[in-house]
Amino acid sequence: MSGASVKELKEIWMREVLPRFLPFADAASTELPLLRLLRLSLFQASVGMMMVLLYGTLNRVMVVEKGVPPWLIGLMVALPVLFAPFRALIGFKSDIHESAFGWRRVPFIWFGTLMQFGGLAIMPFALLLMAEGGSVPPFVPWLAAGFAFLLAGAGLHTTQTAGLALATDLANNDTRPRVVALLFVVLQLSMLISALAFGQLLTDFNEMSVGAANARLIGVLQGAALVVIGFNLLALWKQEAVNRERAEQIKADRAAQKAPPKFSETWSRFIRAGNATRLLVALGLGTAGFQMQDILLEPYGGEVLGLTVAQTTRLTAIWAFGTLAAFALSAHLLGRGNDPYRIAGSGAVIGIFAFAAVIAADPLGSPLLFRFGALLIGFGAGLFAVGTLTAAMNMAERDGSGLALGAWGAVQATAWGIAMFLGGSIRDVVKTVVSTGAFGADLSGPAVGYAVVYNLEIVLLIATLIAIGPLVLRGGHGARSSTKFGITELP
C-alpha cells in the first residue's frame, strides 16, 4: 500500500470513523487535532491526581493509620485553598507575560509543575516527621508539612489556570464548548483512576511494619511527583508556538517605555463587562451549595442509612457518573447554541431536588432514593460548573482568557474550600447540641446534623437562582460574542 493511501485512510479514520465512536471527538479541529487535544488534557490528569492525594488519600492515612490529630491534617489540607484567590492574578499575568519566545502560558505551566513536584517530593518526610516525632522541635515538622501542602496547592492552581487558558488559545470558537467539557471529563476520570490506583498501592498499609509502611508512603508520593512531571511535559510539548511577532512587540513597548496594563485596571473592565460581579456571586453561592456535602455524603449513608463501607464507597462512582453525564450534555447543548446561564440555572434547580431526595431518604428508609440524590447532585454540579465557566469566558476581553479563567477558578476553589470546612463544622456543632437534648426527643437522631447542612445547601442554591436569575432572563446579550453559540472566549 502506498504512502498516500495510508495517509488517506488515516484521515478518513480521524475525520469520519473515530468521531462516531469516541466521546468528544468532535471537540477536535484543524487548529487542535484530537491527539494533540488529548495530550494537552494530561495537565488536568495531573491536577486530578493531586486533588485525590491532598484531599483524600493523605487525609485518611495520616489520621487513621498514623494517628495525627484530625484538626492538624484538616488545617494542612486547607492550606492549598489559601492560594486559590490568586488564580485571577495568575491568569492575568499569563495574559501579559513577557517572554523572549513570545510564550504566555508555557512558563506558568512549567513553574506550576515544578511547585507540584517540589511539594509532593518533600511532603512524605515532613508528614512522617510530624506523625512520629524526632530530634527537632514539634513546630518544625508542622511548618515543613504546611509548606509542602501550600507549595503543592500553589502549583496545582497555577498549572490548571494556565493550562485552561492555553486550551482556550488553541481551540476555535466552534469547538471551545466541547473542549472545556472534555477537559473536565479528563479531570473526573483522573480522580477516579487515581483513587483506585492509590487504594491498590496502599491496600496492606496498616498491616505493614512501620519501616515498610513509611517506605510505601514515600514511594507513592514521590512516584506521583514523577507522574506529574511526565504528564505535564507531555501536555506542554509543542503546544504553544514561538511567537516572534509578540516578542518583538514586547521589545518595542519596552523601548518606548510603554507600561503593560495593570491588574487593577483590567480587573475593573472585566467586572464591569456583562455583569461579571453577579455571575461570580452566583458562582460562589452555587459552589458552596453543591460542595458543602463533600465530606458528609458517605458518613450520612453509613451512620444514618446503615450502608456498608463498600456501598458508601460506590457513591463516589455514582456521583462521578452524574457529573460526567452533565459534562457531555453541556457540550451538546452549548454546541447547539443554548445559553450558558440557563444551563447553570438548570443545574442549581436539579441540585435543590437532589438534596431534597437525600433528606427524604432517612424518614423513608430508602437507600435507593439516597443513591438517586447522589446521582442528581453530581449531575446538577456538572451543569452548573460548565455553565458558569462558559459564561465567565464569554465576558473575557480579547487575549484576556487567563484573567476570566483565573477569576472563575479563584471564586470556585475558595468557595469549595470554605464550604467543605463549614459543612463538617456545622454537622459536628449540631450533633453536639442534639446530644444534650436541646431540640427535644423528636430531633435527637444522628440525621439531624446532616439534615441541617443539606437544608442549608438548598437555601444556598435558591440564593444562587436569585443571583443568576436576571442573567438567565437576559441571556447572553451582554457578552461580547458574535458567534452562533453566544460565546467568544470559552475554553
Image (cartoon, grey):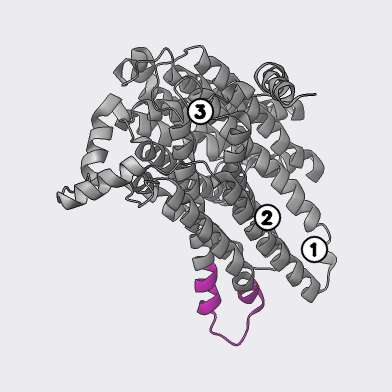
Disc 2 + disc 1, Cβ < 8 Å:
no
Q: Secondary structure at mark 2?
A: helix
What separation in Å lies between label 3 and label 2 (alpha carbons)?
Answer: 39 Å
Question: SS class of the residue under badge 3?
Answer: loop
**Furthest residue in direction bottom, as rendered:** 135
Residue 171 in percent (x, y) is at 48, 29
Q: Is residue 420 left or right of residue 98?
A: right
Q: Distance from label 1 to label 3 (Cα)? A: 47 Å
Q: Amino acid at mark 1?
A: Phe
Q: Which residue is mark 3?
A: 31
Give x and y (percent) for residue 245.
32, 40
Magenta span contains residue 135: yes
**Depth check, front residue: 272 or 285:** 272
Total label count? 3
Task: Please say if 158 is above or below 218.
Answer: above
Residue under the image location 63 percent in, 53 percent down: 230
Marks 2/1: CA–CA distance: 12 Å
- Residue position marked by numbered label 2 in the rendering: 57
Q: Which percent across, then down, holds residue 101? A: 39, 49
Residue 376 appears in view: yes
In the picture, measured across the screen, residue 479 lies left or right of residue 214, that is: left
Task: Please name whichever residue, 49 or 202, is drawn nearer the observer in this view of the structure.
Answer: 49
Tag 3: amino acid? Glu
Element type at marker 1? helix
* 378 inside magenta stretch: no
- Please state the extent of the stretch shown in magenta in the rendering: 128-145
Kindly identify which residue carries mark 1: 205
- The percent position of residue 275, horizontal first and vertical second, equals 29, 26
Q: Earlier in the sequence, mark 1 or mark 3?
A: 3
Q: Nearer the viewer, residue 387 or 131?
A: 387
Find out whether the residues at labels 1 and 3 contact each other: C-beta distance under 8 Å: no
